[in-house]
Image (cartoon, rainbow, N blue to C red):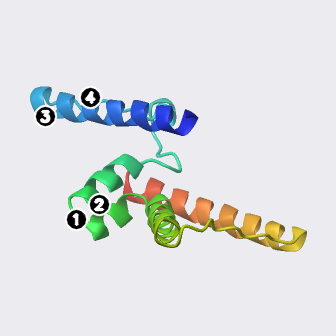
């Protein structure tokens, strides 16, 4: 239930932002981190990337935020596989594998964040 509430609030914020931009030329900055620091946060560009994806512009969606777009594509494939097969995807990792995955996940986050700061000043 919590995820549905979150998605509903997020969708409403996107709709209001788009309407304000379309009718009044106002582009509110919804990212608190960006408003306070002037820099992109690790997820900045995700909404714009999803909007580009909805228009069918895969390349532009990837450029807005590579990490969240690839993560979203992977999630979509997992959910499609679950819908087709009716099976849950379950993966178990050893403690060493978890540490290695955590290290690579942190490295991907840092590289993605550097890209966002460089490409979206």
Q: Where residue 38 sits: x, y (%)?
A: 45, 38
Q: Secondary structure at mark 1?
A: loop
Q: CA distance from mark 2 to mark 3?
A: 19 Å
Can residue 10 be spotted in the picture?
Answer: yes
Q: Residue furthest right?
A: 95
Looking at this view, name the residue that lies furthest to the front: 86
Dot 1 or dot 3: first in sequence order is 3
* Contact? badges 4 and 1 (CB < 8 Å): no
**In the picture provided, is 25 more to the left or to the right than 96?**
left
Q: Which residue bears the numbered disc 3?
A: 22
Q: CA distance from mark 2 to mark 4?
A: 19 Å
Q: Secondary structure at mark 2?
A: helix
Mark 1–mark 2 contact, CB under 8 Å? yes
Q: Quadrant of residue 105?
A: bottom right
Q: Which badge, 2 or 3, is on the more N-terminal residue?
A: 3
Label 4 belongs to which residue? 16
Q: Which residue lies most toward the left here?
A: 23
Residue at numbered disc 2: 53
Q: In terms of depth relative to the viewer, which is nearer, 13 or 64?
A: 13
The CA distance from mark 1 to mark 2 is 5 Å
Disc 4: CA contacts within 10 A as few (<14), some (14-19) or many (>=20): few
Is residue 5 toward the left or the right of residue 94 in the image? left
The residue beneath circle 1 is 56
Q: Is residue 66 above or below residue 16?
A: below
């Amino acid at each position: 239930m919590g995820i549905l509430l979150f998605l509903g609030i997020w969708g409403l914020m996107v709709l209001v932002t788009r309407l304000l931009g379309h009718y009044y030329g106002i582009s509110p900055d919804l990212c608190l981190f960006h408003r306070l620091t002037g820099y992109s946060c690790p997820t900045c560009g995700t909404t714009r990337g999803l909007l580009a994806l909805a228009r069918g512009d895969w390349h532009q969606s990837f450029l807005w935020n590579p990490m969240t777009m690839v993560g979203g594509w992977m999630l979509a494939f997992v959910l499609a596989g679950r819908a087709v097969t009716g099976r849950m995807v379950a993966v178990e990792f050893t403690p060493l594998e978890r540490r290695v995955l955590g290290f690579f996940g942190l490295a991907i986050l840092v590289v993605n964040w550097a890209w966002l700061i460089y490409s979206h000043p």
